[in-house]
Image: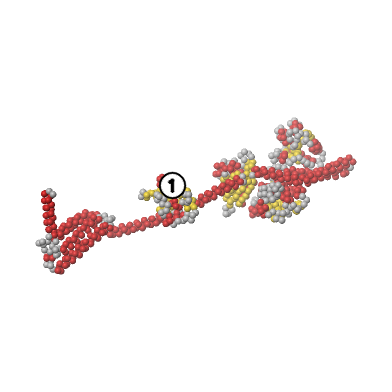
């Protein structure tokens, strides 16, 4: 070690030893007790007091330091540590005061006092520096007020939180909150009620846990919301606790709280709507299948309150309407404009009745298509009434029955001819009897004339005329029965019609069945097609005959009936006055099951090949189309009654021309000229003789070409009498049409051995034309001629 270092070290050791001796060496010093004269009372009083003060001073800093360490939130913690050091040193000086009573360690006591002075000054300086801040500390009252305000604020916060929670729980929409990982951190009570879980079972669970099997969209939904920040509304399926599956509309949006993303979600239960939509789709599919099965052509919905008819595109196409206009609601007048004029009033009446009566209804009507063709539709509809009976809606479907109607017409003709075929044997027998009577009477008449026995001539003439009249009546009935024509309603007397059919019906059912008629007195007139009425009666009688294989009784009865509102509702007709026609047999009867289906098309109980099943259905359709109804009453073993109701017609029936009893007497020349065109010489001769008897000038032609030649000449022709079926390629109708090009006012009387429909063509004669069918009486011919000539004279 260098000498100067050893010198410095020596000096330090000397100085340290001198300081130690000064502090610890009590030599030459007197204990403090000496100053107290070693008085025990004073000595121990000082000793105990200073000891207590010192120990207390030691305890106070420990408490302050403990408090400062336990309260890291204190604003001035260093001051607490300075106070602790100051008080600790003060306590130490008191302990040295006790020591120096007996030991004169005044050096150490001085050192402690120096340290105490240093810490005291530092504490005092720090305290004065911090005094402004300390003065700012709240008082106890202020702290209490602040605490009270804090408690109020906390209470309000709790109430607000409770209200928010209540709103959250009671909101109609089930809500939940997810964290970024899809964990449920909150769920409203409605959400819990919807899925049937308790809150403890839900919180902390992944949202995917509650989705139905196969619904693995939760992760994708969360990613979409978190990455795009866009709200999400998607259909999803959730699983309830009881295992049922709910269809919901799941919504979600992201919200950020202190930078932490949260997804606020909502579930809207749409199970009922989804099921209703599925049921509606299924119903619509069934409806489409059903409509396709029945060849349905369009649907419609008539809002009777707003008087607007809503229809689909098929309906619009049928009636020639704009589909958009029909879908938005069309006026009923725009629909009916496509219905033939002669059917509109009836159809309007049927719709009005269905609307007021309520329930299910059906009726048939024609529609003129945009291309001009007429098609027939069955309207099946249902009327909805308000509780007070006010009509609200009339909804229905149109079914195209044009082909069915044509088929029914063909089958109807087939049935007519089948009935004629059944009559063939009896008719041949009857005609032979009539021809025998005519031929025999004429032969005997000739013989008596040759013998000069004129007295007995009238007897044979009357007999021949009687058989000829019977033959004519039967022929006309057969022609009317077999002809084809559209429904042509007219006012008829049903009693007269039944009476005229009685003989034909008796021949049809055979001798084993007794036919009785019970016509009502003063029977009202009715409006219907007489030919269809005849066909209906014959069909019913044939059915009755088949139901009485061992014979029985067949009764045809007519009556006047007035139906009030209740009775009309039972019959599904309008209230009012009707004519009823009943056909009753004593046959086998029907079971309730058969009776319920008797009017169904193609339903029959007859063996295969023995019936078409259309007879009763055509009768039912005829009655409804005529504004009436048909019903069946039957019981097994007790017979059957079929009753047809037809509406009363308050106009008189068209009078039938009756042949006069007396022959026409010769008349003076009239100056009128009549052209007779007929290829049958005998007929031409008879007509010519009658005309000459009436005083007319007659020109004859045997075919259409010859007749037209006369008509195109300058010869005066007041009346044309022509057969329809003429040889030479030009029939009577064609000849007349050509002649009327130059003679538009020409009066024409057609003579034909066919049904009048062969002449009518379109269904009606032009003005100035009439038709008479063979055979006819000469007096009937004369009456027709006079009527037509009188028109010429009137003009």
Across and down, in percent, residue 309 comes to 57, 46
Across and down, in percent, residue 304 comes to 58, 48
Q: Residue furthest front?
A: 1
> Can residue 245 be seen in this snapshot?
yes
The image quadrant where one finds the C terminus is top right
The colouring scheme, among rainbow, by chain, secondary structure or one colour, is secondary structure
- When asked about the image quadrant of residue 459, the answer is top right
Q: How many marks?
A: 1
- When asked about the image quadrant of residue 443, the answer is top right
Q: Residue furthest right?
A: 451
Please indicate whether residue 368 sits to the left or right of residue 235 in the image. right
Q: Secondary structure at mark 1?
A: helix
> Can residue 502 be seen in this snapshot?
no
Q: Nearer the viewer, residue 389 or 328?
A: 328
Q: Nearer the viewer, residue 707 or 195?
A: 195
134 is higher (above) or lower (below) than 336:
below
Disc 1 crowd rating (10 Å Cα; few below 14, some 14-19, many 20+) is few
Q: Residue furthest top?
A: 713
**Residue receiving disc 1:** 220
Q: Residue at x 88, y 44 (%)?
A: 455
Please indicate whether residue 121 sits to the left or right of residue 523 in the image. left
Q: Nearer the viewer, residue 368 or 493?
A: 368
Across and down, in percent, residue 454 comes to 88, 42
Across and down, in percent, residue 366 comes to 64, 43
């Amino acid at each position: 070690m260098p000498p100067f270092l050893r010198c410095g070290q020596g000096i330090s050791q000397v100085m340290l030893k001198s300081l130690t001796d000064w502090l610890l060496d009590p030599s030459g010093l007197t204990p403090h007790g000496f100053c107290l004269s070693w008085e025990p009372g004073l000595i121990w009083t000082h000793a105990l007091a200073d000891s207590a003060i010192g120990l207390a001073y030691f305890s106070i800093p420990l408490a302050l330091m403990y408090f400062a360490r336990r309260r890291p939130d204190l604003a001035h913690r260093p001051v607490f540590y300075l106070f602790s050091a100051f008080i600790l040193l003060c306590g130490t000086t008191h302990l040295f005061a006790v020591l120096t009573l007996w030991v004169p360690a005044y050096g150490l006591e001085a050192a402690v006092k120096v340290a105490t002075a240093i810490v005291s000054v530092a504490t005092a300086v720090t305290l004065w520096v911090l005094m402004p801040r300390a003065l700012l500390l709240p008082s106890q009252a202020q702290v209490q007020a602040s605490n009270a305000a804090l408690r109020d604020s906390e209470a309000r916060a709790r109430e607000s939180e409770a209200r928010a929670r209540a709103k959250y729980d009671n909101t109609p929409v089930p809500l939940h909150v997810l964290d970024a990982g899809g964990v449920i951190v909150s769920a409203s009570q409605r959400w819990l009620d919807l899925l049937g879980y308790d809150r403890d079972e839900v919180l902390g669970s992944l949202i995917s846990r509650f989705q139905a099997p196969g619904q693995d969209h939760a992760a994708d939904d969360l990613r979409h919301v978190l990455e795009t920040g866009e709200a999400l509304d998607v259909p999803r399926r959730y699983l309830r606790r009881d295992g049922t599956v709910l269809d919901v509309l799941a919504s979600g949006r992201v919200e950020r709280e202190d930078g932490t993303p949260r997804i606020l979600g909502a579930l809207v239960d749409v199970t009922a709507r989804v099921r209703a939509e599925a049921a509606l789709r299924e119903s619509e599919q069934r409806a489409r299948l059903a409509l396709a099965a029945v060849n349905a052509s369009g649907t419609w919905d008539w809002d009777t309150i707003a008087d607007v008819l809503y229809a689909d595109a098929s309906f619009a196409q049928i009636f020639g309407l704009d589909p958009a206009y029909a879908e938005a609601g069309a006026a009923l007048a725009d629909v009916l404009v496509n219905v033939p004029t002669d059917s509109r009033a009836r159809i309007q009446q049927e719709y009005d009745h269905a609307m007021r009566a309520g329930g299910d209804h059906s009726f048939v009507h024609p529609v003129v298509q945009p291309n001009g063709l007429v098609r027939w539709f069955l309207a099946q509809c249902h009327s909805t009434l308000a509780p007070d009976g006010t009509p609200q809606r009339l909804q229905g479907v149109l079914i195209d029955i044009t082909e069915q109607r044509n088929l029914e017409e063909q089958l109807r003709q087939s049935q007519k001819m089948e009935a004629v075929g059944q009559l063939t044997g009896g008719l041949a027998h009857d005609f032979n009897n009539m021809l025998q009577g005519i031929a025999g009477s004429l032969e005997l008449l000739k013989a008596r004339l040759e013998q000069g026995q004129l007295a007995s001539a009238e007897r044979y003439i009357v007999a021949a005329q009687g058989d000829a009249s019977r033959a004519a009546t039967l022929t006309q009935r057969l022609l009317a029965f077999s002809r084809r024509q559209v429904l042509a309603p007219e006012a008829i007397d049903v009693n007269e019609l039944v009476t005229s059919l009685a003989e034909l019906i008796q021949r049809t059912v055979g001798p084993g069945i007794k036919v009785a008629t019970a016509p009502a007195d003063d029977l009202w007139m009715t409006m219907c097609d007489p030919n269809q009425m005849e066909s209906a009666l014959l069909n019913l009688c044939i059915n009755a005959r088949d139901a009485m294989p061992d014979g029985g009784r067949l009764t045809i009865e007519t009556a006047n009936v007035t139906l009030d509102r209740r009775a009309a509702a039972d019959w599904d007709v309008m209230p009012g006055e009707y004519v009823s026609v009943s056909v009753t047999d004593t046959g086998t009867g029907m079971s309730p099951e058969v009776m319920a289906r008797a009017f169904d098309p193609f339903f029959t109980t007859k063996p295969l090949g023995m019936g078409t099943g259309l007879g009763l259905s055509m009768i039912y359709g005829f009655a409804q189309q005529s504004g009436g109804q048909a019903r069946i009453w039957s019981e097994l073993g007790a017979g059957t009654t079929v009753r047809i109701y037809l509406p009363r017609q308050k106009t008189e029936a068209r009078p039938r021309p009756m042949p006069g009893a007396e022959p026409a007497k010769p008349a003076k020349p009239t100056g009128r000229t009549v052209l007779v065109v007929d290829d049958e010489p005998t007929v031409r001769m008879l007509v010519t003789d009658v005309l000459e008897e009436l005083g007319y000038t007659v020109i004859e032609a045997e075919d259409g070409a010859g007749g037209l030649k006369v008509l195109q000449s300058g010869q005066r022709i007041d009346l044309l009498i022509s057969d329809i079926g003429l040889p030479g390629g030009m029939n009577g109708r064609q000849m007349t049409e050509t002649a009327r090009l130059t003679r538009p006012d020409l009066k024409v009387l057609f003579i034909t051995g066919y049904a009048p429909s062969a002449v009518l063509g379109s269904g009606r004669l032009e003005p100035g034309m009439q038709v008479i069918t063979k055979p006819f009486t000469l007096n009937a011919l004369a009456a027709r001629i006079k009527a037509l000539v009188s028109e010429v004279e009137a003009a």
